[in-house]
Amino acid sequence: NDTALDSLEGDLAPFSLNDDEEGEQDILSPNETEIQTRDSSNDALMQKLLAEHGLEDDCPLPTDDYSRALLWKYCLSVAGASWHAASLLVESENEHHTDVAINWGGGRHHAHADKAGGFCYVNDIVLAIKRLLQSQSVDEAGTLASSRVLYIDIDIHHCDGVQQAFYSTDRVMTASFHRNSPGFFPATSGFVREKGEIDTAGFGYNLNVPLPTGIDDVTFIRMYRKMVFGLVNSFDPDFIVLCVGADGLEGDALVTGKLHSTDHSSTGEGWSLSPEGLAECVRITSSLCAGLSEEMICTRPMKEEKKENQSDETASDCSNPETKATHDSRESLQVGKR
Ligand SMILES: [Zn+2]
């Protein structure tokens, strides 16, 4: 909303908006301004600059001013929504007692501070986490302490942009579950050996969990529960941020290369998760944010489990309201307060 955008614009220095009376076409980001003032006849220099900022391939810079203005507005909207979601959870501003907030269009985890990538022009996750880190928590003794954030990512791709942003801090625990396959985007990160910057407070606060192709609901949720409960118990975060990429769904068109019939770059294999499986991860995480303990959060049986054990209709006695998620966008970002 406009209030959130106004707040965000104030915090996004050195970015600035030139939203004058001439109209939206004058809205430019610094990078665009820099690019426009260069000698446009020097194509090689232009291409070098665009490549430096990742503005090519899947993140092209539109060629006309109007489309570029829309792109900038889009970046502000995506980032502003996640920023606003995070703001709702911060104690002093939490007038509505919000436990969980979702940005259905968020989760742009590939963008870096100065570089776009993987269809991500702005990293709304990093901004939302930074908003949460501005708050303080009160421990049992009544002492103010810096808040901590557990970031969990279940998009099929590794969250390279988020990992880099918090690689040197122990205030953000980053845990990524992603597909392990040579050459699979982003290909240059997501390895188990990446545990945080050596010789900084962040070492030991970055967890990569590469997973094989074809993983199904039963295996994924079983692992997700074990990992998330372990992380929550050991790290004791004040907030949990969950990036729910929908490209782990079975038959995802982009991952399997079916989006474009001429696209032969994909290996044709992804994960085999269902919408119900992803929703179960959201439900487990939301339940944690609502104050439920591990013992109180049971697991709903997935289709595969039901097939294996048809007679066990009572495998789950969950009394919590069912979390339903409809995915008309490929990513979403959930932030929750503990
Ligand atoms: Zn993805």
Image (cartoon, rainbow, N blue to C red):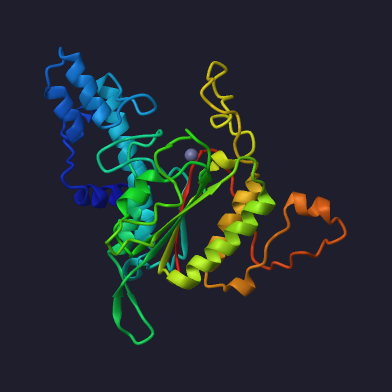
- Left or right of 9 on screen, residue 91: right
Q: Is residue 251 above or below residue 290?
A: above
Q: Is residue 267 above or below residue 242?
A: above
Residue 150: image location, x then y, percent: 42, 62
- On screen, residue 124 versus residue 306, left or right, reads left
* Residue 201 or residue 97, whichever sits in front: 201
Identify which residue is drawn at 49% across, 66% down: 231
Q: Residue at (19%, 50%) from the top-left corner?
A: 10
Give the farthest residue toward the top.
41
Q: Tell which of 183 and 140 is nearer to you.
A: 183
Work out whether 264 lies above or below 305: above
What percent of the width, then of the height, locates residue 228?
53, 63
Q: Is residue 289 visible?
A: no
- Residue 149 lies in quadrant: bottom left
Q: Residue at x 17, y 20 (%)?
A: 45
Residue 39 is situated, as x and y percent measured from the top left of the image, at 12, 17
The reply to whether residue 136 is visible in this rendering is yes
Question: Left or right: 222 with respect to 152?
Answer: right
Q: Please tell me how many numbered marks the rendered image carries.
A: 0
Q: Quadrant of the C terminus?
A: bottom left
Residue 72, percent from left and from top: 28, 34
Q: Residue furthest right?
A: 311
